[in-house]
Each structure stands twice: as structure tokens, then as C-alpha cells.
Amino acid sequence: MTSSFSRATTRQGLIALALATVAGTACTHAPASAGYDQTQQATETAAMADAGASTTVEGQGVRVEASFEAPAGGPLTVRYQVHNSGDADLAVFDRGNRHAVMTKRLQAGDVGEPVFHEADGGLTLSHRALPLPEPSPTLPPVPLAARLAPGASLEGTFNFAPLVGGQPDRVRWCLGVAPFDDELFRSPEQGGAVEVWQAAFSLADSQQLVCTPWFDTARGAFED
């Protein structure tokens, strides 16, 4: 399932929403062929499911397991694991952008702030490569991606809370991924346990988006 995510405009009512409050943690696991403990992975997946409503979605060469938790009056918490189910390295666009790192708003290797837009009666959060803004700023927000080997997995967590009003009735999360093409990535940097690469802006149009089903915040459950 491959799609390009065009820049969407936010309705006037969402202008009051501030960027998400993000607390990101991540860890890359070794592939099973390198001795990764499958029992440990099962335990982590079960713990993630216990934290809230969980879902699993698959794309081309990738599987994403996610859990959503939206306590009354609190932020939406999303915990996820990304699994490279293909036979080639994968770029995962959940590490924010270089401008955020340079301005100290984000530590290299941490999960970045999700972008958001309203559509289909709900709010879509996403971590994805964004196109180069026009006009181009002096310090362009170069997309950052984690490099994920075949059979490996990556964990992450982020929170989202609008500063005005409560959580939207429906919300989903989309993750951008792409095959790791050496010609489109440069300047690797180790950010904790995650190897982070700067990506070409052209990947904003060719990345694959893997999206969860809609999550009903009132019921605390994913829609069928």
C-alpha cells in the first residue's frame, strides 16, 4: 500500500490547536537472526496492549503495532512498534526534522512532533517526511529517519494534547516509511540506540503511509 500524503489545510477551528506535546522514547531491536529474544518481543507487545486499545496494520515490507490511550482530561498517548518485515533496509520517518534538532527543540534520535490535519470527521496525526516549504527557509527542516534493518523492530511513544478544548472525537495516526536508498539519505548520526539519517525532500512524495484505523476517544476503542 503506497500513497503520497499531500499537504492538507487545517480548518479554522483547528488553528487554535498547538503542536503536539511529545515525549518520545525509542529503542531498536536486533533482528531474530542476530539472536533477538522472541519471548521478550511477545512480552513487550503484550505490555503495549495492556496500556490501551491496540491495533496492527501492515504495509509493503512493514508491520506496525500501536496502542492508543486517551484518559479523560489527559493527553492521547500512542505507543508503537515498527517491524521491518521485508528483505531490505527501511527508513522510518518518525524522528522529526534537522531544524528541530539544531534549535534544541528535539534531541537527535527522539520521536518528533506529529503533524496533524482534519479530514473525514476526525483528526489525523502523522509522522512523515514533509516537502520543502516555499519559500525555502534559511535552515530547512530536513526530514530525519531511523534506519531499520530487515527483521529488526523499533519502538516509540508520543503524546498529543491540544492546548484549547478537549481531544477530538476521532483520531488516527499515520507513519511514513520508505525503502532505504543510499542516494537519498546522508549524514548518519547516532541518537541513543537509533541511527538517524537526513533524508531527501523528494521522499515526501514517494513514501508509503501506514495508518491505523480511526480511534473513538470517547469509547477508548478503534472503529471496525
Image (cartoon, rainbow, N blue to C red):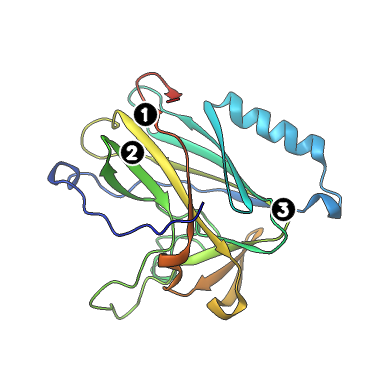
> Which amino acid, by three-letter code, is at mark 3?
Ala
Residues at badges 2 and 1 in contact (C-beta under 8 Å)? Answer: yes
Mark 2 and mark 3: Cα distance apart in space: 30 Å
Mark 2 and mark 1: Cα distance apart in space: 7 Å
Residue depicted at x 49% and y 56%: 2
Which label belongs to residue 161? 2
Q: Quadrant of the C terminus?
A: top left
Marks 2 and 1, the one that precedes in the sequence: 1
Q: Residues within 10 Å of mark 3 (few under 14, many from 20)?
A: many
Marks 2 and 3, the one that precedes in the sequence: 3
Q: Pointer 1: what residue?
A: 74
Query: From the viewer's perspective, is 146 left or right of 119?
Result: right
Query: From the viewer's perspective, is 7 left or right of 67?
Result: left
Residues at badges 2 and 3 in contact (C-beta under 8 Å)? Answer: no
Q: Nearer the viewer, mark 2 or mark 3?
A: 3
Question: Where's residue 151, x and y in %?
Answer: 74, 53
Residues at badges 3 and 1 in contact (C-beta under 8 Å)? Answer: no
Question: Which structural element holds mark 1?
Answer: loop
Q: Pointer 3: what residue?
A: 152
